[in-house]
Amino acid sequence: ERIRQANAELARSREELRQKNAMMEYNLKMAGEIQLAMLPQQLPVFPRSAATAESAFQFTHRYHPSGTVGGDFFSVSALSDTEAAVFICDVAGHGVRSALVTAMIRALVEELRPLAHEPGQFLTKLNSELFVILKHTGTPVLTTAFYLVANSITGQTRYANAGHPKPLLVGRGSGKLELLKDASRKSQPALGLFEKALYQTSEATLVPRDLVMLFTDGLYEVHADNQELYTQDLLAASVRKRLQLPTAQLFDEVLSEVRSFAASHEFDDDVCLVGMEFAGAPAVK
């Protein structure tokens, strides 16, 4: 009788656990759908009256969370009829905690639109606001970010970097590949670690057919069976081989190459890529 009662209690516990797991999976699925809805649903064109194919800036993105929810986030917006803004960030880890931080960052990015024209000031203010929120959690949350503003008429691009992987500037016309480095040549800290951190604005000038490729470190921090690491140098070499491909095809082939390199043939971390190609100012009709 005692064994029968114990088995019945165990069956009830298993059913309760199954129901709780089902509810947790449902909630995570809903959270994942909401997080995807937070990403840009419609990409801007320049000028606003232009057809998508004739836009001075062409945008492409790939977003692959490693779980139901992720810690990567990006936004693409029009600050004016001639200025585009691209923001990308990576919250350390992946899962619910990271996803909540990305939601806070999205809200702050919208709130700080008055500073959006000045990348250094924008990241400086974003850092101080995030620091105030996160200091009450007791443990720091490492968040890297990169923000750029580009002019569709002149190609002038101003940007600031908060500990994020340096984007690749792919010169399709020149055949050159280079990193968008800080003007000071010194790395600046990730967001939310130091309340008074100041971020510097750097500059570059795009020419027609140039592609700026932004990404999070989940793209290249993968290991092969022999524990060899897929480095940023290997990533650059992979992009260089596909320099002239359309951006969407370039992204897909690079992702496929990294997956083939990885021991599990999958990404262990969230992956986000954003491409901004400068087509040049459209002709005035």
Image (cartoon, rainbow, N blue to C red):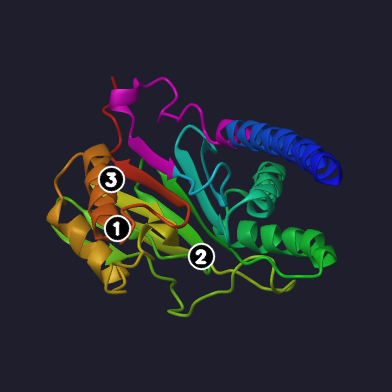
Q: Quadrant of residue 251?
A: top left
Query: Residue 202, how many percent across, how many down?
Result: 46, 66
Do the numbered discs 3 and 1 sit on residues whose CB atoms are within 8 Å? Answer: no
Q: Earlier in the sequence, mark 3 or mark 2?
A: 2
Q: Are marks 1 and 2 in contact (CB under 8 Å)?
A: no
Image: magenta residue range: 34-63
Question: Which residue bears the numbered disc 1?
Answer: 169
Calculate the distance from the C-alpha at mark 3 to the C-alpha at mark 2. Answer: 22 Å
Task: Say which residue appears at 37% left-offset and 57% top-offset.
Answer: 219
Tell me which numbered mark, 1 or 2, is placed earlier along the sequence: 2
Quadrant housing the N terminus = top right
In the image, what residue type sits under mark 1? Leu
In the picture, the quarter occupied by the C terminus is top left
Q: Which residue is mark 2?
A: 161
Q: Is residue 52 visible?
A: yes
In the visual, does 100 lie left or right of 265? Answer: right
Q: Is residue 48 magenta?
A: yes
Instruction: Say few, some or many: other residues with alpha carbon within 10 Å of mark 2 (under 14 / 14 to 19 / 20 or more).
Output: many
Residue at image mark 3: 251
